[in-house]
Each structure stands twice: as C-alpha cells, then as structure tokens.
Image (cartoon, grey):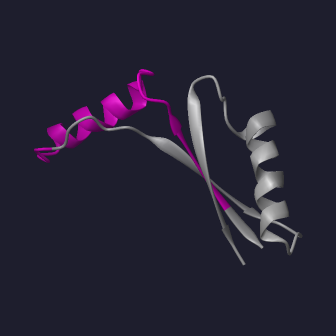
Amino acid sequence: MKARVYISLKNGVLDPQGKAIGHALENLGFTGVNNVRQGKLIELDLASSDPEEARRQVGEMCEKLLANTVIEKYTIEIAE
C-alpha cells in the first residue's frame, strides 16, 4: 500500500522559501504569480493492506516526526 503525505505551512506562518521562489519567478519573466507557498511531499510504501490502519499509522508518523504540527498542516492520501 502506498501513502503520500503533503505537508505545508499553516496560513499565517511566514514562508521565506515561497517568497524567494516568487521573486525568482518574477525575475524570470513570469508575471501574475501571487503568494507562492512551498511544501513537502513524502511517499511511503507500507506493508499494511488495510487502508484505515495505514491512514492511522501515517497520521501517527506525521504527528510524531514528519510534520511540525505547530506550524505545518498535512494531508494524507492512501492508494492500494
């Protein structure tokens, strides 16, 4: 079973990397791009065959290690 975890900064948290990307895009001539936010994608290959158990396990991983839940939010996708 495969899992994807999308991690991004919560609204209101400053994103200096997103700001740098936005400035670089502008310098390259891309106009009309506003408020760039960057994040992380983590892909996991799980031994579990139960989607609910896999989601619970990945959620626990996010809470304990993968995401800094003080400033980051995450979304989990499970695919069989």
The quarter holding residue 32 reads top left
The residue shown at (80%, 44%) is 61
The tally of labels here is 0
- Of the 4 image quadrants, the one containing the C terminus is bottom right
Q: Is residue 24 magenta?
A: yes
Magenta region, residue range: 4-32
Q: Is residue 4 above or below residue 20?
A: below
The residue shown at (32%, 37%) is 21
The x and y percentages for residue 72 are: 57, 32
The quarter holding residue 4 reads bottom right
In front here: 39 or 54? 54
The x and y percentages for residue 12 are: 41, 22
The residue shown at (49%, 30%) is 10
Q: Is residue 12 above or below residue 56?
A: above
The x and y percentages for residue 53 are: 85, 62
In front here: 8 or 50? 50
The residue shown at (67%, 36%) is 67
- In this view, the residue farthest toward the bottom is 80
In front here: 14 or 20? 14
- Of the 4 image quadrants, the one containing the N terminus is bottom right
Query: In the picture provided, is 8 more to the left or to the right than 48?
Result: left
Query: In the picture provided, is 2 more to the left or to the right than 60?
Result: left
Q: Is residue 58 magenta?
A: no
